[in-house]
Amino acid sequence: MADVFVSYARNNYEQARAAAERLRERGYSVWIDDELPAHRAFSTVIEESLNEAAAVLVLWSQDARVSRWVPAEAGMAYNADKLVQMSVDGALPPLPFNHVHCEMATGWKGEPDAPAWLKIDASIAELAKARANGTPARAPVRKAQLPLRPTAQPMLAVLPFDNLSSDDELTYFCDGVSEEIQRSVSDGSDLKVIARSSSFQFRGTDKDTDKVAAALGASHLLDGSVRRGGMRVRISAELVDCSTRSAIWGDRFDGELEDVFELQDSIAKAVAKAVTKALKVDFAPKGKERTAPPDLYDDFIRARGWLAEGDATFDDSAKRAIPLLEKVTSGAPDFAQAWELLASARAWALRTGLYDGPYDEGRGGVIDAAHKALELDHSCGGAYAALAMLEPWGAYAEREELLSKALEVSPRDPAILTEMSVFYWSVGRFRDALALAEQACELNPLMPSAQLLVSQMRLYTGDYEGGIEMNRRIRRRWPDNPGIQLSQINSASFLDFWDAYDEAVPDIERFDGWQAKDMWAAKAYADAKRTRDPVLIEKRVARYVQLLEETGTLPLNLILSIAKLGKVEFALDLAERASYDYVFDPQGARPSIYYPGTILARWSDSLRVPRFAKLCRRLGLADYWVNTGNWPDCVEWVPYDFKAAIRETLPEAV
């Protein structure tokens, strides 16, 4: 009977062997599958060995996520409360295993003194000791029990269909077919479907099954092609099981291009019905939607593509999409999807400051578009999300209500999951924020902002090493993304991960404009914090005081920064001088990327003194927490009775 069972994907064999050797050096007996007896069934031996082990060490990787065996073995360990997880390439464990802590050990080659391995060793020791004493080990936190022989929930990626004709304009038709299939499956079933902005990154010869499955975490791929002959098209579609690389369904569809959108709709529903049947998922198609004439629908597809594949926080995708969507809604006033997208684009333009006209006019444009979308189709979750973006930052209850409605009608929309995650972040509910961020990232794994939000929420929930390592990994993948670059500079300097900080700073030269300005300011602060040079510290603090005197307010991240320099009381003095009335003003300035949740982090020194509660009252947080009972995570670890301190700031006991 082995003490430890090691589960891994074949491409991680060397790391699995290294793990087994380290464990044997510590005196544990280890089962690894190269010890399989030749005369016994593979599955039988695995199940027996796993059940007998005191601990199960799962080595997660991109390959392990899509393996037939690793998720199944992890599920059995998860149910038996003996799952220990380590990521060897930065890949996140799939749901539901992400509810159990996973050590990030990217590039680990067997070093016994690596910090991640020392934590793995300690976890295994705890489980082994519990079995030796005949007492149950502490169960991991989780939401639901898995079946003993779990089958991972299918995750479908719909790839852009290939254009096999010489007509380049047909590419938009191909994308439209793929998107309509994607929407039909997502809207008509409970099947998880990867978002367009991730799945559409694989085109033509870049569609190797193993590569796509590993990058997207997909269990099944739907791919196809379109060939045109005159006014007739032939569409071929195929559903592939990634674990076996074999097609489990395929068909052809012929049609006339005279009514291109009727053709798209009918083919999408036929394919969606066949795919869900093949995957044993119920399918209930939505009723036929009113769309637009061909030329306007083409504009709609273009605008939707810009928004899906852009990052409205840092680029002009929303501003570019608005004129096209206004053209579409003007010519097709009953097209609900276009109104929904227009509301979202207008809201993003307002939030990021790219709207050129009067704020009242822009706000009214968002409201008009959102209400028109909901009038035509009450399931337009993006319209509710756009309305939530209009609410002043301090209208916490109103924002939460609108985002809850959005999630109710669009529970698997990555953009809406992200907006609700950011809301939870802003009110200090970091565990809830991480759970939604991980869902959004699972559905949109190649969207940089989705990956960034997960890395940030890992930090806020206390997983500093995991969060920093993930930030480093995604920065290497998207080196030109300013949000990821700025996050690594700020987070690494605040948490004293100076190796990660030093790695990022030279790349500031790659950026310009306001992004570069913010990065240089972050570096100036980090230099003062790192050196503890009194001259540099006083220079930074004087700059922040000057900003308060010039503007009448002080961004919340700067309150955090001043306190981190050893000036907690002075930071709170400045906060009392600053005005935060704008967070309640519908026309007030938005807090940019520095959300109130920043000052509620574990590394916030100002949070650790009871006086901090007064700032929470001025930000509207105290009223929200008391009235809803949805308290922030910090109530569990601040060194005073946080709830009592908050209640004392209110004019009347609630």
Image (cartoon, rainbow, N blue to C red):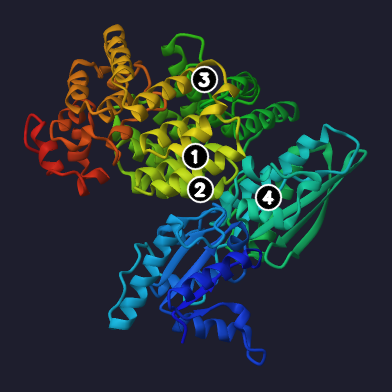
Residue 409 visible, this angle: no
Identify the secondary structure beneath mark 1.
helix
Circles 1 and 4: CB distance less than 8 Å? Answer: no
Relative horizontal placement of residue 631, taking residue 44 as reference (left or right): left
Report how far apart the C-alphas of labels 1 and 2 lie in the structure.
19 Å
Between the residue at mark 2 and the residue at mark 4, the CA separation in whole angstroms equals 15 Å
Label 2 packing within 10 angstroms: few (<14), some (14-19), many (20+): many
* Mark 1 or 3: the one toward you: 3
To which residue does mark 1 refer?
Answer: 452
Q: Earlier in the sequence, mark 3 or mark 4?
A: 4
Question: In the rendered view, would you say 309 is above or below 618?
Answer: below
Q: Quick check: marks 1 and 3 in contact, CB under 8 Å?
A: no
Q: Amino acid at mark 4?
A: Val
Q: Amino acid at mark 1?
A: Leu
Res. 607 in view: yes
Q: Callout 4 environment at 10 Å: few (<14), some (14 to 19), or many (20+)?
A: many
In three-dimensional space, the C-alpha distance between marks 3 and 2, rounded to whole angstroms, equals: 34 Å
What distance separates the C-alpha of mark 1 from that of mark 4? 24 Å
Residue at horizontal 47 percent and vertical 39 percent from the top: 499
Give the residue at mark 4: 158
Q: Give residue 163's position: percent from left, percent from top.
A: 83, 42
Q: Nearer the viewer, residue 273 or 402?
A: 402
Secondary structure type for disc 4: strand
Give whichever of discs 1 and 3 has the lower sequence position. 1
Residue 216 located left or right of residue 414: right
Above or below, comparing residue 95 to residue 589 in the picture: below
Residue 509, given in percent of the width and then of the height, sits at 57, 22
Residue 556, by quadrant, is: top left
Say the numbered circle drawn on residue 412: 2
